[in-house]
Amino acid sequence: MILRHVALRHARRTLTPQSLRPLKRFVSSEVESADASVQNSLDEVQAIAAHINSLTAAQAPPIDNLTPSPAQPAAVSAEAAESYLLFKHRESQFGAVGSVVAPHYQPHTLLSNPPSPSDVTLELLLASEAHQGHATALWNPANARYIHGIRQGTHIIALDQTAAHLRRAAKIVTEVARRGGLILFVGTRAGQDRCVVKAAQLAQGCHLFERWIPGSITNGQQILGKCRTKVVNEKDEEVPGFEDQLYDRSVLKPDLVVCLNPMENYVLLRECGDHSIPTIGVIDTDADPTWVTYPIPANDDSLRCIQVIGGVLGRAGEQGQKLRQQAAARGIVTYPPASDLKPPAHTSSVASQLEQTIEKRRQEAALIDRTMSAEEPQEVENKDDLEDSRDEER
């Protein structure tokens, strides 16, 4: 009896409207999802039919009776046609007006194709941030003549001073290269290695992008004494036979040093000053311009500025080398040759043989002259006897 009563009680509760609500919700959601999927499929088919109708002249029939056939396009109104013609007219008149933004700056061009001294402009220096100085608290009063003004606590370098000093330094590099001088390019900061190597290759000089060894100039015989040296002619062709004379010869010293970061290479600049070697340096607002012989006021912290300056000086050295080679092709030597080198042994023997041959020919010529002068009186005597005999006959 108890179990039967419980079953009847729960059966009555299951048949109430409140218990049937979740079932209705489930069935309705399933029906709605099915309708949505059918509608999506129908929309896709209609889109495909519209695409086919746009490609073909004949209209595709509808897939069912519920889908209406595509209506014919209505005729274009006169107002719309007039607006379209006005738009095309304005486009033809003002379509070419305006500016086109193009990427002009390409970082690799400063290394692959450096600018020449004639390409130095204020726009190029401004784009390379050569005008950016240091904070006013870090400035060196000796740079007052190179400073244009102050902006937000930072000194601004005068770009006209930078351009003038850069052109002067380029002329110096050109003349040193034309006279066969040895140019050393130094840049020991991070990122300056490729710029320094490229400039040295153009100017046919030497480069240094690592730490400068103190004493390389003042004590160069001990540090650089084992470096190989050679003798070349005016066409840069190696001349053999001088190897024995180069062992006791002092090491080579640069004729010009181009330092791109003087703040880290004060020892190098001091050694160059002690040996009267001219120097060119990039001087920022916190550096002392008296450290170098020919300062270039510019931003030494900008890698793009350093690449511009190094490329310009490298091109200047390349121009000087071309002038020297052109003069050598005409037989003109633009530099004084080494006077303390003696000709090699085989060269001296050939010269001595040539001198002996010349002396022998001189002796033969003198003997011929003596014999000719001795025969002249006999001819005169014969002429006198002939005249006397003619007189007697008469």
Image (cartoon, helix red, strand yellow):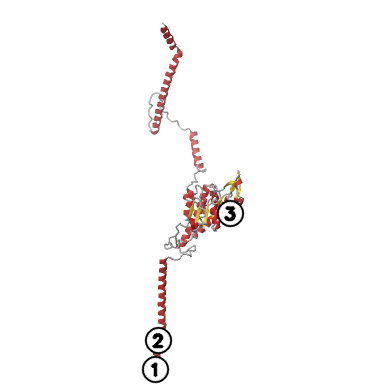
Mark 3 and mark 2: Cα distance apart in space: 87 Å
Work out whether residue 319 can be spotted: no
The earlier-in-sequence mark between 3 and 2 is 3
Determine contact: label 2, label 1, CB under 8 Å: no
Foreground mark, 1 or 3, reads: 3
Three-letter code for the amino acid on which mark 3 is drawn = Thr
Q: Please tell me whether residue 53 is drawn above or below residue 216 in the rendered image.
A: above
Mark 2 and mark 1: Cα distance apart in space: 22 Å
Q: Please tell me whether residue 144 is drawn above or below residue 38 in the rendered image.
A: below
Three-letter code for the amino acid on which mark 1 is drawn = Glu
Q: Position of residue 366 (x, y in %)?
A: 42, 78
The residue pinned by badge 2 equals 378
Q: Position of residue 334 (x, y in %)?
A: 49, 62
Looking at the image, the residue that sits furthest to the top is 1
Mark 1 lies on a secondary structure that is helix
Residue at 50% x, 36% y is: 83
Quarter of the image where one finds residue 278:
bottom right
Determine contact: label 1, label 3, CB under 8 Å: no
Q: Position of residue 73 (x, y in %)?
A: 43, 31
The residue pinned by badge 1 equals 392
Please rate how many residues cluster around mark 1, counting C-alpha atoms within 10 Å: few if below 14, some from 14 to 19, many from 20. Answer: few
Q: Position of residue 113 (x, y in %)?
A: 47, 51
Quadrant of the drawing holding the N terminus: top left
The residue pinned by badge 3 equals 290
Residue at 46% x, 14% y is: 18
393, 200: nearer the viewer? 200
Quarter of the image where one finds residue 362:
bottom left
Residue at 54% x, 54% y is: 269
Looking at the image, the residue that sits furthest to the front is 222
Please rate how many residues cluster around mark 3, counting C-alpha atoms within 10 Å: few if below 14, some from 14 to 19, many from 20. Answer: few
